[in-house]
Amino acid sequence: MRIRRIPLPFLIATGLLVVLTSPVSAQRVGDVRAEALRLFEAGDYRSAAAQFDELLKRKPRDLEARSKRGIASLRLNQPAQAVADFDAVIRITPWSYSSHIDRGIARVMLGDYEDARKDFDQSLGLLALSFKRDPTSLANAHCGLGQVAHRLGQDDVAIEQYGEAIRANPSDPSGFLGRAEALVSKKDFEGALPDFGEAIRLNPRQSRAYAFRGDALWQLGRLKEALADFDLAVELDADNEEAHSRRGSLLAQLGENERALPDLDAVIRLDPRRAAAYKDRGGVLVRLGRYGPAIEDLNKSIKLDPRRATSYQNRGAAYSGLGQYEKAVDDLNEAIHLDPINPGARTNLGLALFAVGQYERALAEMNEATRLAPTNSLVFLNRAGAYARLGLLERAIEDYNEALRLDPKAILAHVGLGKAHDSLGHRVQAIHNYDMALQLNPSNARVYTSRGNARRAEGDWKGALGDFTKAIEINPKFAEAYVLRGWSLLCSDRDGADADARAYLALQERPDSSTLYMSLLGALGARRAGNETEARVFLAKALSGTNGSAWPGPVLRYMYRALPAQQMLEAAGDDLQKTEAHVFLALDLLQSGKQNWAVDHLRWARDHGVAHSSSADLARVVLLSLETSNLEPIPQASATPGTPTARQ
């Protein structure tokens, strides 16, 4: 065979090329390796992976680069890529127990638990053959087996494996953390706390440990400590999705709904396809009364997971908040279809049915909720509210008491119990219940007004006025408190009713049902203070904006001295207006010093007026005040029985 000659210049050029480029290429590979390792050690796994990609293109059998790229993929939550790299390493070095452990971890992340178990078992077998004991790898293999068992619900096995890991390497926090999580899964929250504590002692910067310990503390009712742990977890890792989720849920449970929203926003930012996060944020928005945005979130939750009953439950609550009760009933029926033993859905369905007048079915759903959750305070609280609105106050009291037995800190149960006793005339008991509610939440303005009303009915004007004043201090824009304090000041013969009337009118951007009555209060208060000019200003402004013949126009005209008292009484068209006419006439007569005649009209309103109307209640409290301030009974001024006539 003839050998072809190669020209000498070509040989020289080729030789020169080899001599000149080989060192440069080797230097380039070394630089890539050094940079990849530097980035890996710095924790910049994404950049390190890109450098390992470049290195492995040139040296595909570089086992260190492939192994470290696999670990970087684990850190980047790319377990499938990691498995491919560890497969390649194990094909070349099947005795590498560390690669079996790493591949087992990747398989756990993929949910391939049986193959993961085989990897961890294989690693333990290889470690047993090793001449040098490796406590770190031994602990990692047992932790891996513990994690597989935990994921499969075999928590007793998991606890045993984590115990082996701790014995192999007691300085590794992973064994303690894993065992604590398994104990939590078994509801042994107290037993888990020492392991969480040791894991945190060994690694105080471990966000996951704080998040899971916070969850255990929450389950134990140690809410303040739980919240502190969630705060630390988020501080250590702002992207800890579970810590944000748990802290948001706990804040919502504590009624801190505005504070909960940023955490739930973070969960959705970190995992936009997490249906539960949209459900949770939707629930918080419902509690804040932001029903439109809540429904948007709950629609997304249902789209992502149509089988999640609580999403329908929360959306049903949102529709109820909007007054769209038919839609609410549909959603809540679907929630019960998906989860027949959900007491919350049945309670909400009962409330929606109650709103559309289906009282019998509403109570049936609430009864079922109490059967399903006999230790849940809320289901008894909601049924109590339904009983109260139906006028079944004794039954309501029973349920409120049961709610308090189950949860002594249920503020709404104390308030509801107070209102029920108040309605039954048990005002001393009502005041006690309001006291309890205010001990739990001393900044609730509405409870102060409720207690003030009860105190006023008992003749405790000083206590009532103190409560109404406290409500105004808490919320200076609480218009109802000015109404209550203003009338109480007038009826207890104190100054300031005109100032409260003025404050109320200043708060109203447009007239409402109380505007004209507060103008009457202002006029009465100004006259009591001897300021007739100011009284007429109140009345003139009210009359300028209303039809003088429409009620309570005749009362305004009478107070303005433009209509005789008898004509004012005759202008009252129904029983409620007649009650009001007699009360206002009585108040005016009292200011004129005609107490006996005033009493006649007050007694008529009390005895013959519309029961439980605000004017009849006012007549009762004024009579009580007059009777307690007189040693002798007040005589009746009317010459004949029946409806008293006006006297001026």
Image: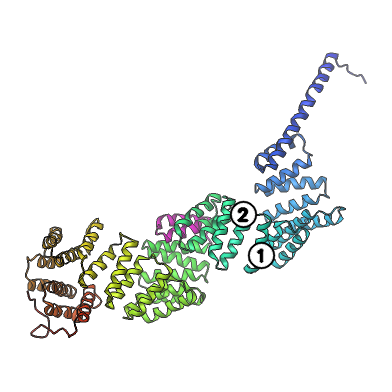
Looking at the image, residue 398 lies above or below residue 86:
below
First in sequence: mark 1 or mark 2?
1
The reply to whether residue 392 is in sight is: no
- Reply yes or no: does residue 292 show up in magenta: yes
Residue at x 26% of width, y 68% of height: 484
What amino acid does circle 1 point to? Pro
Quadrant of the drawing holding the C terminus: bottom left
- Pointers 1 and 2 in contact (C-beta within 8 Å): no
Say what secondary structure mark 2 lies in.
Answer: helix
Mark 2 Cα-neighbour bin, 10 Å: few <14, some 14–19, many ≥20: many
| Residue 322 position by quadrant | bottom left
Instruction: Give how far apart the Cα atoms at labels 1 and 2 are.
Output: 17 Å
Residue 636 appears at what percent x and percent y?
13, 84
Q: Which residues are magenta?
A: 278-307
Q: Is residue 106 magenta?
A: no
Q: Residue 427 got which mark?
A: none
Give residue 207's mark.
Answer: 2
Q: Which residue is mark 1?
A: 194
Pick the residue in front: 608 or 362.
608
Quadrant for residue 186, please give it. Answer: bottom right
